[in-house]
Image: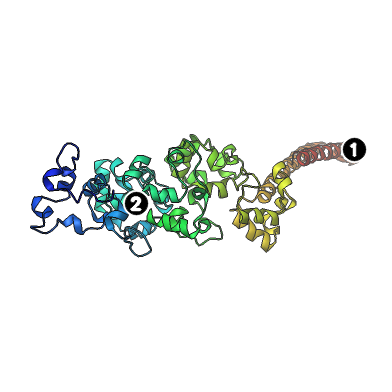
């Protein structure tokens, strides 16, 4: 660890009790360079992450890691050990067509899994866990093992033993990780649940050594967001059912159990009562396929109602307070009066707060109730109109029969002779119609 075998003679390093000659050989050393008769190999002039993966492995076998190999910390702009691959932080439609095609076809990225940093399934694997064709594709658009493992995987799929082997355990230990928390035996450290701004400066320093910065630490969605919502609005979720592709309909109907009715009626599907963490892995995968992920699901689908009051983010909790919620009403799921108002009856402040919680006119609860009432009124009006038409048809039939009747000796028609009786019948019929309409109206009000 201190001398790295540099005090040994070349012929001694192959001895059974030493056996390090193969590692120096793979770094390009031979007896002449070792004895100073020719220049040191090229690897000796590289920084740690400029070494090839094979060279870095050999150096680690000789008890080197990033800091001891470099002798001093070497950082690129921004304090990172490796230069940032800038294209990875461009949004999907800003990529070159060729890069986007390779990312989609070979690495299985989609618009949402590319734009939400850390969301892609492929990013959960380190370089050596990729298939040969995936590594070839990644190399073709600008990655290598060092940039992938640091900037994409952040060494998260390494075992703790491998972290120690490459000296990366020091950075993760500084963020509170241990071998037990790393393998899931113990809970993750507090730093794991902090946003970038909640990390202290020392934690940020160590996070940068693992190629983190604010955007990828917070898993920011780099999709352009020009709306009033805290996250980009998931377009496919608010498209009508009949505009979805057959594949999207199949996915929505599968583990998420949507039907056309529950898809088109926001907030009524059983699945939307669950927060992201309550979904199964399959349901999460299907939600991602529909353009939703943790933040957009919890905001646009669940509106945070699956969370406890105390676990709500401070800004979110303050927003709910403006709309009339408090801890007691939240626990009892008792909606405040503001939720009964139609969208256009909310004040500007209330609408602004509602946007912060991913509500808008179409999915606002009071608007949905108003639409239900409007639908009931339309149904009642239709029934009333049908009843009036029935009465008109019956009266018209009677008039035609009366016109066909013969005139009496005094010149009075049969209709005139029976006008008094018919008037009585019409009064009875009108009374029945009124009673029926009152019954329909009472039924409708009770239902509402």
Residue under circle 1?
424
The location of residue 414, given as percent across then percent down, is: 86, 37
Percent of width and height locating residue 39: 11, 59
- The secondary element bearing badge 1 is classed as helix
- The answer to whether residue 101 shows anywhere in this view is no
Q: Could you tell me residue 415's position as x and y percent?
A: 85, 39
Q: Nearer the viewer, residue 18 or 215?
A: 18
The residue to which callout 2 is attached is 150
1 lies left or right of 191: left
- Please give the name of the residue rendered at 52% of the width and 48% of the height, measured from the top-left corner: 190
Residue density around tag 1, few if under 14, some if 14–19, many if 20 or more, within 10 Å: few
Q: Residue at x 49, y 34 (%)?
A: 255
Colour style of the rendered protein structure: rainbow
The 10 Å Cα crowd at callout 2, few under 14, some 14 to 19, many 20 or more, is: many
Say the numbered circle drawn on residue 160. Answer: none
- Of residues 313 and 300, the one drawn nearer to the viewer in this rendering: 313
x and y, in percent, of residue 16 in the image: 17, 36
1 and 2 marks in contact (CB < 8 Å): no
The local secondary structure at tag 2 comes to: helix
Separation (CA) of disc 1 from disc 2? 93 Å
* Residue, far bottom: 77
Please indicate whether residue 396 sits to the left or right of residue 281 in the image.
right
Residue 297: in sight, yes or no? yes
Q: Look at the image and tell me in which quarter the C terminus lies.
A: top right
Residue 422 lies, with reference to residue 348, above or below; the image says: above
**Residue situated in front as seen by the camera: 139 or 341:** 139
Left-right relation of 195 to 133? right
Which comes sooner in the sequence, label 1 or label 2? Answer: 2
Rendered position, 320 above or below 372: below
């Amino acid at each position: 660890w201190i001398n790295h075998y540099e005090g040994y003679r070349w012929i001694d390093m192959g001895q059974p009790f030493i056996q390090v000659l193969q590692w120096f050989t793979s770094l390009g050393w031979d007896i002449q360079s070792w004895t100073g008769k020719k220049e040191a190999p090229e690897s000796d002039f590289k920084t740690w992450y400029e070494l090839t993966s094979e060279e870095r492995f050999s150096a680690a076998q000789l008890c080197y890691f990033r800091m001891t190999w470099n002798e001093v910390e070497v950082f690129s702009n921004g304090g990172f050990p490796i230069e940032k691959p800038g294209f990875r932080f461009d949004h999907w439609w800003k990529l070159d067509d060729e890069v986007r095609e390779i990312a989609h076809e070979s690495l299985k990225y989609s618009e949402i899994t590319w734009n939400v940093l850390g969301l892609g399934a492929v990013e959960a694997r380190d370089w050596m866990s990729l298939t040969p064709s995936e590594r070839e594709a990644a190399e073709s658009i600008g990655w290598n093992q060092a940039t992938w493992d640091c900037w994409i995987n952040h060494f998260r799929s390494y075992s703790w033993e491998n972290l120690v082997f490459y000296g990366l355990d020091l950075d993760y230990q500084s963020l509170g990780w241990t071998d037990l928390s790393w393998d899931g035996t113990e809970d993750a450290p507090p730093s794991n649940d902090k946003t970038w701004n909640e990390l202290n400066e020392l934690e940020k320093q160590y996070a940068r050594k693992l190629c983190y910065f604010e955007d990828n630490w917070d898993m920011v969605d780099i999709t352009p967001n020009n709306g009033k919502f805290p996250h980009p609005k998931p377009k496919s979720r608010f498209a009508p059912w009949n505009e979805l592709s057959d594949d999207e309909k199949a996915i929505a109907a599968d583990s998420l159990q949507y039907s056309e009715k529950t898809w088109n009626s926001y907030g009524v599907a059983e699945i939307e009562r669950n927060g992201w963490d309550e979904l199964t892995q399959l349901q999460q995968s299907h939600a991602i396929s529909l353009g939703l992920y943790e933040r957009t699901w919890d905001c646009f689908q669940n509106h945070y109602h699956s969370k406890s009051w105390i676990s709500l983010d401070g800004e979110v909790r303050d927003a709910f307070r403006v709309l009339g919620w408090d801890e007691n009403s939240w626990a009892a799921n008792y909606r405040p009066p503001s939720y009964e108002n139609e969208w256009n009856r909310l004040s500007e402040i209330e609408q602004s707060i509602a946007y912060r919680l991913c509500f808008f006119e179409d999915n606002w609860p009071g608007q949905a109730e108003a639409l239900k009432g409007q639908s009931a009124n339309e149904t009642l009006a239709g029934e009333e109109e049908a009843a009036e038409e029935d009465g008109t048809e019956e009266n018209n039939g009677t008039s035609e029969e009366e016109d066909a009747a013969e005139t009496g000796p005094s010149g009075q028609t049969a209709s005139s002779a029976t006008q008094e009786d018919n008037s009585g019948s019409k009064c009875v019929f009108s009374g029945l119609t009124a009673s029926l309409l009152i019954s329909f109206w009472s039924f409708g009000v009770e239902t509402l």
